[in-house]
Amino acid sequence: MRTPSNTDSILPVGTDRKPLAAEVFGLPAVGRKQPPEICFPRRRIVRSMTGTDRPRRLRRTPALRRLVAETTLEPRHLVLPMFVADGLDEPREIGSMPGVHQHSMDSLRKAAVEAVDAGVGGLMLFGVPLPEDKDPAGSQASDPDGILNRGLRALASEVGDATVVMADTCLDEFTDHGHCGVLGPDGQVDNDATLHRYVDMAIAQAEAGADLLGTSGMMDGQVGAIRRGLDAVGRTDTGILAYAAKYASAFYGPFREAVSSSLEGDRRTYQQDPANRRESRRELDLDLAEGADIVMVKPAMAYLDILREVADRATVPVAAYQISGEYAMITAAAERGWIDRDAAVLESLTSIRRAGADIVLTYWATEAARRLS
Ligand code: PBG
């Protein structure tokens, strides 16, 4: 015997068949001969389905759609991540990120001016040292003559106050083992020893002219340590853009090429597990308590739920980083003619804004800013 369900009453008693989906939802079934017991007058059904509620009315013309758009995307929302590499005379294109370059000092200045002219909100600089300059402590990171600090000085002098100059405050580009911190005798990343290196690096970057420091290493206590370190040398005006939620993501792949990373293995002892949501609330609360001026979620597209949650909870502006793998996916699919590149770029950026980001780091910042202004 079949178990009675609450849809049974739709069919007359004694009918020996399951109801059609259309019958359950009270819709006219299409393309199928109707049994006489459900032949409703069609017009009445259509009217009762829509009533006076017709959301399409506001989608009819571009002007109506523009009037009611909830999310905006403006040049000032966009931050351009840039790479400056030591020993380059010419910019070198990154294979897995067509259109993105490791810059020479000259091409860095030029690209920065273009970004500023397009109206971007900021620039985030990463440094790529010569392989022979990498060491276990990442010494170049805090050396005023290290490539990143030289690049920051170049940016600060080139763009002045026309945009916000940001620095990546992490050791991974500078260590010969490629980890974001220094290693202890056991070969594991030593959290507290790393904090001392971050403070030195932060002070060097502030002195080189960075307005904001992007703490991307995911060490415990990094925001508090850097804040205290900056304050102690009178750099109270240098802000911290804290990577609050940063996940151990496969989508960083192309970035590792971009910075000629030496990493073997992974970063799962310090970056977050993609399975976790609650942990991001904890990371956020810690960064806020430690003095973060802006908080960031990274990656963006696979973590829009996290971004929304952080945006709802944060008491400071929120950023999200559309990372290298997100750039590479859209670029590669578009190269194959599988998606409309320009539309996909703006849609992806809009979705990140809609999820709650005030600021979006994207390798398309200059291009998108041009198209938006
Ligand atoms: C690490 C760092 C990473 C990115 C920025 N800073 C990645 C990593 O953990 O290896 C990724 C940026 C991107 O993928 O675009 N300091």
Image (cartoon, helix red, strand yellow):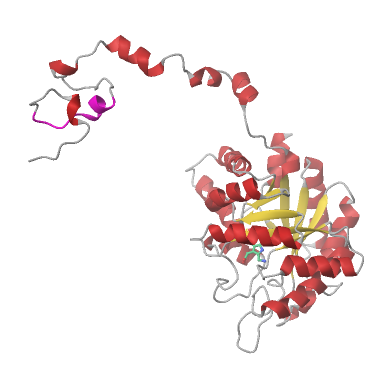
The N terminus, quarter of image: top left
What residue range appears in magenta? 16-25
**Residue at point 37% right, 12% down?**
47
The C terminus, quarter of image: top right
The image shows a total of numbered marks equal to: 0
Which is more toward the observer, 219 or 321? 219
Which is more toward the observer, 110 or 67? 67
Q: Is residue 273 magenta?
A: no
**Residue at point 60% right, 71% down?**
270
Q: Position of residue 14 (x, y in %)?
A: 7, 26
**Residue at point 20% right, 29% down?**
20
Quarter of image, ligand 1: bottom right
Q: Position of residue 17 (x, y in %)?
A: 11, 31
Which is more toward the observer, 328 or 268? 268
**Residue at point 54% right, 58% down?**
278
In the picture as drawn, the residue positioned furthest to the bottom comes out as 185
Camera sees residue 103: no
Q: Position of residue 76 (x, y in %)?
A: 76, 41
- State left or right for residue 294 relative to residue 342: right
- Locate residue 109: give its quadrant: bottom right
Could you tell me what secondary structure mostly forms the magenta stretch?
Answer: loop
Q: Position of residue 284 (x, y in %)?
A: 65, 58
- State left or right for residue 364 relative to residue 84: left
- Locate residue 102: give its quadrant: bottom right
Seen in the picture, residue 107 relative to 60 is either above or below; the reply is below
Seen in the picture, residue 220 relative to 236 is either above or below; the reply is below
Camera sees residue 33: yes
Seen in the picture, residue 341 relative to 270 is either above or below; the reply is above
